[in-house]
Image (cartoon, rainbow, N blue to C red):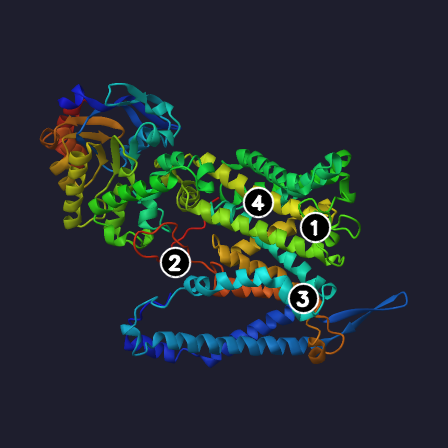
Amino acid sequence: MNAPSITTAGQTQAVTRAFDLGAALKDSLKTALIMLGLSIPILAYKTDQSGADLFLTPRWGLVAIICAIVFGMRLVLHAFTASRAYRQATPSSHQATEPVHAEPSAFQHVSKFAIPFFLGVALCFPVIIYLIQGGLNESRYWVDLGILILTYVMLGWGLNIVVGLAGLLDLGYVAFYAVGAYSYALLSTTFGLSFWICLPLAGILAAFWGMILGFPVLRLRGDYLAIVTLAFGEIVRLVLINWVDLTNGGAGISSIPRATFFGIPFTAGEGGFAQTFGLEFNGMHRIIFLYYLILVLALITNFVTMRLRKLPVGRAWEALREDEIACRSLGINTTNTKLTAFAIGAMFGGFAGSFFAVRQGFVSPESFNFLESAIILAIVVLGGMGSQIGVAIAAIVLVGGPEILRNLTFLQAIFGSGFDPNEYRLLLFGAGMVAMMVWRPRGLISEREPSVILKERKAISGSLVKEGHG
Amino acid sequence: MRWLQDPILDVQHLTMRFGGLVAVNDLSFQAGRGDITALIGPNGAGKTTVFNCITGFYKPSEGMVALRKPDGSHLLLERLPGYDINWKGKVARTFQNIRLFSGMTVLENLLVAQHNPLMIASGFTFLGILGIGGYRKAEKEAIEKAKYWLEKARLMHRADDPAGDLPYGDQRRLEIARAMCTDPLLLCLDEPAAGLNPRESLELNELLLSIRKDNGTSILLIEHDMSVVMQISDHVVVLDYGTKISDGAPVEVRNDPKVIAAYLGVADEEVEKVEAEIGA
């Protein structure tokens, strides 16, 4: 990063004079012209319909305002970069004596407090929401949101094994989610198997499909692997749509049996959950149970992943990400190692899928499109590949953030009553992603934690850790 | 010529073609058990190709690469899948451009090298994940072995640092230590002294000699640094344009006119004489 500056006087002077107003104005003017060019097709005319006729309403005033804004912002950007370059080029008197990277890393900051904090919040979440909202029915929306976030946390953790640890770029992870969901849906509606039997079966089936995908694609690397996994995701979705006899096609499978409290159904009548435990019947019991179910499933995913990292297979995954050729020279069977990564990642996707089916009570191919894969991958990349806590934070931000934006109605007071923050969700989402990649290009938590230590625990800087080549 | 009496590696008529290019042409040589054998030659002579054939990164177009186990049985390396050459054949190698797991610590690098025994100890992950079986004990032993090699490569103080942070000379030694953690019978080193200063080069010599003495590992090395080759090797094989031009003890090879011609070239008036000598 900031290399200790060995600046000569001449360089310093060059930088002090660097803010060249004339050049900055010229560049800003150019940018404004580009904006003007772009505005002509996009902004300058608005089509208004009056009866059957279409009118073009010119909006040159708006174009002028936008161009002026772009001009001003470009100028400010120039001033900002020039002053920053000046500051970096003139070393402060402390700089020479200060050790580089002496401050604790982001990982150490976060992991010390964040892990117990997040775990505590996650465990008490329904209680907190109950107390804040003042009633079970009122807290329904928030608990549902919690379930949604935790589902993505679990999917992120599952994909993290494949992408973060083994370094295999998988764009079709949602296929395993779909396999898990349809496994539960079909097994329970056809054979009447209970959720607790179907859950491991769904995981095994997804792992099996992970292996089936793994075999042909293991020769591929990088972009080619990404494209084939993407295609696999689409194939699974298209098969689900078109194999109408088995999957009921695009109409999906409905009336999937609900989850039971280890055999006790959440019903109002005789023998139901509420009656057995002497509670007043409330539909929220089931929702809260589902919340804790996905929390436990997610924590199991996390526990297994942490454990695998300390086992030879986990180290081999990471070694594979770092250097596949060196792995082979050390006697590691790279094919099998990659297959286990695919299979175990897929298994957790399958678990999450069967949870999805039991929560919704309805599955259709529409739920498993490419966007889902993209979101899960974005969670992993944004969180920092390989970092468990980073992935959890990214899932909260990426899934919870847009939902919270829905509720920012107070913004209407600022932008007028016609303002709907919901419409800007994706815009802000995109802007946030760009900002993240500018400031923390290796994800929220890029440091890698060693799996074994001899004397002293040191986090490994993200710049040394490789992303893998597929 | 004791390498003919008890060879650990017997390469016979090895040929490697890439399309029309013949990188190695009908090469035969033996490496003696307990010897340090050097493979030298000018740039592009095909030394690394020979290494890649021995260690399974290339499948030879023709020929045989046989490893003689201590009990006298032969193992044909060219028939094994690449990863089994290390595990079954007990041949380990390093790379010309260092290939460490740079984002993993020095200790982790040495544990990855012990993947196969640890994998068995962890019951192929199934027992390890449940926390039953002897994995914990096996891991402790693996760490002890790693410590032995850290001590030997003088990297103990850097054990918890990422391998990518190490200076160049340390990385070279770590790569050798990592290869040795797989308990090889034959250690193949691809230019271990490249980029080292004279002092580091001397330390490397000591390390290699002690590996041979204490661990009984035979060493096959490619090297350009003649101070290393002449000081420590027992047997030198010289390649030029994929064919063997000389084979013998270091002193013999050093005075071989063919080797001198290949390395230094010859004056115009001598070309015919040398050509007659080498039979070109």
What is the CA distance from the residue labelled 3 to the residue labelled 2?
41 Å
* Mark drawn on residue A130: 3
Chain under callout 2 = A
* Mark drawn on residue A461: 2
- Marks 4 and 3 share the same chain: yes
Give percent across and percent down for residue B22: 33, 27
Q: Nearer the viewer, residue A431 or A145?
A: A145
Q: Name the residue that disc number 4 marks.
A: A348
Sequence order check, earlier mark of 4 and 3:
3
- Marks 1 and 4 share the same chain: yes
Q: Nearer the viewer, residue A431 or A22?
A: A431
Vertical side of A13 occupied by B50: above or below: above
Mark 3 vs mark 1: in front: 3
What is the CA distance from the residue labelled 4 to the residue labelled 3?
30 Å
Give percent across and percent down for residue B84: 37, 29
Mark 1 vs mark 4: in front: 1
Q: Is residue A301 left or right of residue A101?
A: right
Q: Is residue B213 left or right of residue B138?
A: left
Q: Name the residue that disc number 1 marks.
A: A359
Sequence order check, earlier mark of 4 and 2:
4
Looking at the figure, which quarter contains the N terminus of chain A?
bottom left
Vertical side of A307 occupied by A389: above or below: below
